[in-house]
Image (cartoon, rainbow, N blue to C red):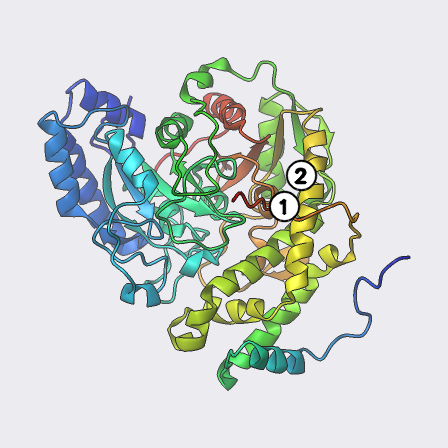
Amino acid sequence: MSDPLTKQATASDIARAVMSRKVKASEVIEATLARIEQAEPTVNAFTDVLAQRARARAAEIDSGRHRGPMVGVPFAVKNLFDIKGLPTRAGSKINLDGPIAARDAALVRKLEAAGAVLVGGLNMGEYAYDFTGENAHYGPSCNPRDTTRMTGGSSGGSGAAVAAGEVPLSLGSDTNGSIRVPSSLCGLFGLKPTYGRLSRAGSFPFVDALDHVGPIARSVEDLALSFDAMQGWDPDDPVCTDRPAEPALTELGEGIGGLRIAIAGDYFERGAEPEALEAVATSAKALGTSKRIVIPEAAVARSAAYIITAIEGSQLHLPRLRTRPQDFDPDTRERFMAGALLPGAWYVKAQRFRRRYRAALQKLFEEVDVILAPATPCTAPKLGQVMMKLGGVELPVRANLGLYTQPISFIGLPVVVAPVQLPGGLPIGVQIIANHYKEAAALRVARHLEKAGVASAPPA
Amino acid sequence: MKEELVAEDKPDIARLIDEAAKAIGLAIAPEYRDKVILNYERSLAIARPLLEVELDDELTPGPVFRP
């Protein structure tokens, strides 16, 4: 167990130490605020640091007012989550003129009810239409593994803050890969749960049909701990499931016995750089599998996810595109404008295809329980890089970092990203994909890789 | 009968954008226009796999509206 006052401490380490009174919550928060102050000039993860609020909460914990499995754990959230008293930026300048949040987002309330302490809001790509973590208004979040490189996005600050060891836990959102891409490029564990598993209430939307929310952390135990604290039906999010919560933390010790694990071939190997394939191969070896499967029509699924995103996201922002185009980030503005002009019939076709693809994947899950695939086709590109070479073909970075994540979130399958730290190089993530509502299976596989030393997420 | 799934002739994207933008009341300033065209062309290329598939009539859209 790490010293709870150091950047190596996980959320679980801190909770155990506060619970057993080895350390005060106030001491944890002071150490966290000091680390944030020290790291921010180089990583630019935070847009709002809530020192006063966090200190007050910690003092309440120390006076015995709040208990719970996450007591004293500092966490921060992508700034599309409502934070009481602040405008919900969602990475934009425009939203600063919008309403001040009257209360915290549902997941912030759930984590604080479990004893955790919110310390701030995190940088992100504007309106979440982003895979890079860059932002024209607030500057890019920088990858703590190499600050000349991208964090990945759009939950860029959520990746940077955890990888730098500022906080052990953050929340992000994932419409097409925005939790999984930064987890991969920053070398972190990330969980994109089943669509509708966790409440999105009080988070600024992007694409209702595809929006998910979930945690990023440096251990599998922390993903499970926070996931369990956030589960449960919420009538404020019409998509949120009314299935009973299925705790995952107690399942972690089960190991991988009984799980049929396979590697996704075909689409998920095309265009990948050698590091991405090596990370999958190393993980598969540690899991004792060489079984390969093909996810049918993955390229069509990616295409359909792209179209739903472009049309739904652009429709949401059309009033602002009409009135304040000059206030958008130049990297989202024209994409939104183009999306607003695409034929609506494409959207309907994409939604119809979604049902066919879901049925095909359900059939596939009769044969396997867990599928492995790369999270990103490459390691972190340089900040500002516009084009990249994948499989010898020159492609735009922005549209292609999510090549392997889009076909999975398209039908809301749960995924854990396990980070593989390649010798002498940058980290890269492996997607551990399970069937709907089987988050625990993906977490068990990630835990096995973590215990085997194949996946790890030390702070930079 | 196999439908004509994708147009063989490349449409005039610049004109299409100008007219479609008028139809929805979106003024696109001249300095944004080239990048809108570029992004529309990218979207056409990425949409192609979706436009090329044929779907059974029984396949209704995914979202479920519960009154």
Instruction: Determine contact: label 1, label 2, CB under 8 Å.
Output: yes
Please state the horizontal and vertical placement of residue B40, each as a whole percent of the image. Answer: 62, 70
Q: SS of the residue at dot 2?
A: helix
Which label sits in the foreground, 1 or 2?
1
The quadrant holding residue A287 is: top right
Of the numbered discs in the image, which one, if any, rests on residue A358? 2
**Residue extending furthest right?**
B1
Which amino acid type is marked by label 1? Gly
The quadrant holding residue A310 is: bottom right
Numbered marks: total: 2
Residue that numbered label 1 is attached to: B62
Q: SS of the residue at dot 1?
A: loop
**Above-or-below relation of A356 to A256:** below
**In the shown orientation, is residue A148 left or right of residue A358?**
left
* Chain for disc number 2: A
Mark 1 and mark 2 on one chain: no
**Above-or-below relation of A38 to A218:** below
* Chain for disc number 1: B
